Amino acid sequence: MPVVNRRVRAATLAAATAGSAVLALLAPTAGAASAATAATVTAAAPAKAVRVLYTCSSPRNPQPEDHYLDITVTAPRFVERGDDIALAVSLRTVDPPLRNVPARDIKAQVDIAVGGAGRGTVQATGLTNTEPVEAGKQALLTEGRATVEAQRAGTHTFRAGQRVLVQTSGYAVDCVAKGASPVAARTTVRR
């Protein structure tokens, strides 16, 4: 094959795959089943934060206060029925903390409501501030994970659920949503 044709084919392949992300599977890698599963997972859909109003209270401030949180849910575009839908969740505070917060001092759990072809609620755990947060700056919590089993074919929708629990070294905050949030992500489950 001439060198020019190889370069054209390589450039075409590179263009076709540009922007795609390969999700790492945490499932065992032995056997044909794993190869088939790896082939069914596609790149995550672009994630966009949704702003949700919560009423929050804590032992330090038992009088409930309203706070907005920006919640991002990232999900794969497609999976096969029977596979797991791996969700990545992050949270950004709209109201900044009043004091400096060291890295990994804030921990959170976020309920994720599953709708469309799916039903129920899952809890994203492991959210934390990986970087220190300066007083007066928004806190970003990342590394949240949740898994949904794709039991039915169709489009599964994911939105911020009713509850967010936040724990710092000083106190806990319990937040309850004031109404339904918009859809944050979608995954199509193939037959």
Image: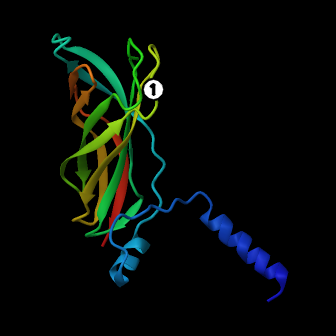
Q: Position of residue 190 (x, y in %)?
A: 33, 69
Colour mode of the rendering: rainbow
Q: Position of residue 176 (x, y in %)?
A: 19, 27
Q: Is residue 106 left or right of residue 149?
A: right
Q: Which residue is mark 1?
A: 132
Q: Position of residue 166 (x, y in %)?
A: 26, 28
Q: Residue at x 29, y 55 (%)?
A: 156
Q: Is residue 65 above or below residue 186?
A: above
Q: Quadrant of residue 19?
A: bottom right
Tag 1, which secondary structure? loop
**Relative to the observer, which residue lies in front, 36 or 167?**
167
Q: Which quadrant of the figure contains the N terminus?
A: bottom right
Q: Which quadrant of the figure contains the C terminus?
A: bottom left
Q: Position of residue 53 (x, y in %)?
A: 29, 24
Dot 1 alpha-carbon crowd within 10 angstroms: few under 14, some 14 to 19, many 20 or more: some
Q: Residue at x 66, y 72 (%)?
A: 13
Q: Quadrant of residue 63?
A: top left
Q: Residue at x 34, y 51 (%)?
A: 87
Q: Is residue 136 left or right of residue 173?
A: right
**Relative to the observer, which residue lies in front, 83 or 141?**
141
